[in-house]
Image: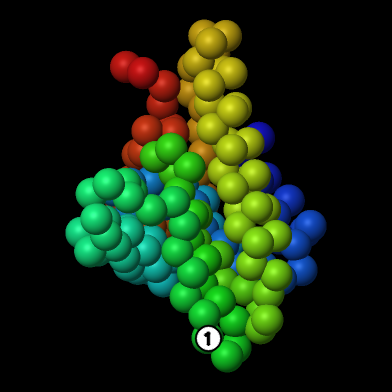
């Protein structure tokens, strides 16, 4: 399973998820349902910064946050962390947030499980990509820890 498959499955089973993106701790995109890569990268950067800010304001004994919810009348922005992967999702209004968080975590865990299984089996090159290369974005690298297993 790659990021595109995981996101497709997520949006198919969850009618409350309007858009979603997966990124790493450096805010590098792994996958997105958005067509506009600049918007997706901006959202990933903002979500990473929000996690960093929340770490600073929380007491050290609480540890690092695992999820953040921003609620608006039109819907919610949900951000979850599993390992070194993050997912941001925008929901419709009045979402069932517990279920949405569960679905986001399940999606991320599937990707992590695939990577670990491939590593155990010695299968190189788990490749999760954000979008196909085009003339507009061919200079943008999608190098993340999830594109190559070398050195893991």
- 46 shown above or below 94: above
Residue most toward the bottom? 73
Quadrant where the N terminus is found in the figure: top right
What residue sits 39% from the left and 68% below the top?
43
- 121 shown above or below 95: above
Q: Is residue 58 left or right of residue 42?
A: left
| Quadrant of the image occupied by residue 34 | bottom right
Q: Give SS at disc 1.
A: strand
- 54 shown above or below 141: below
Q: Is residue 101 left or right of residue 124?
A: right
Could you say where residue 45 lies in the image, as x and y percent from the top left? Answer: 31, 62
* 107 vs 69, nearest the viewer: 69
What residue sits 59% from the left and 48% below the top?
105
Determine if residue 77 is in view: yes
Could you say where residue 138 lies in the image, as x and y percent from the top left? Answer: 37, 52
| Quadrant of the image occupied by residue 12 | bottom right
Could you say where residue 141 lies in the image, as x and y percent from the top left? Answer: 33, 46
How many numbered circles are shown? Answer: 1
What residue sits 24% from the left and 55% below the top?
59
Q: Is residue 121 left or right of residue 133?
A: right
Could you say where residue 90 lies in the image, as x and y percent from the top left? Answer: 57, 72
* 39 vs 135, nearest the viewer: 39
| Quadrant of the image occupied by residue 37 | bottom left
Residue beneath disc 1: 72
Quadrant where the C terminus is found in the figure: top left
Using a 10 Å C-alpha cutoff, classify the residue at mark 1 as few (fewer than 14 neighbours), some (14 to 19) or many (20 or more).
few
Determine if residue 4 is in view: no
């Amino acid at each position: 399973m790659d990021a595109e498959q995981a996101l497709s499955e997520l949006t198919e089973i969850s009618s409350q998820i309007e858009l979603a993106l997966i990124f790493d701790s450096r805010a590098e995109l792994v996958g997105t349902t958005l067509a506009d890569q600049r918007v997706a990268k901006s959202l990933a950067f903002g979500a990473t910064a929000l996690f960093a800010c929340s770490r600073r304001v929380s007491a050290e004994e609480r540890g690092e946050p695992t999820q953040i919810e921003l609620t608006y009348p039109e819907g919610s922005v949900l951000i979850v962390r599993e390992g070194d992967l993050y997912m941001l999702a925008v929901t419709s209004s009045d979402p069932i947030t517990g279920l949405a968080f569960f679905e986001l975590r399940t999606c991320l865990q599937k990707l992590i499980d695939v990577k670990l299984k491939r590593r155990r089996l010695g299968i190189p090159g788990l490749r999760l990509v954000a979008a196909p290369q085009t003339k507009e974005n061919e200079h943008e690298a999608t190098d993340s820890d999830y594109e190559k297993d070398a050195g893991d």
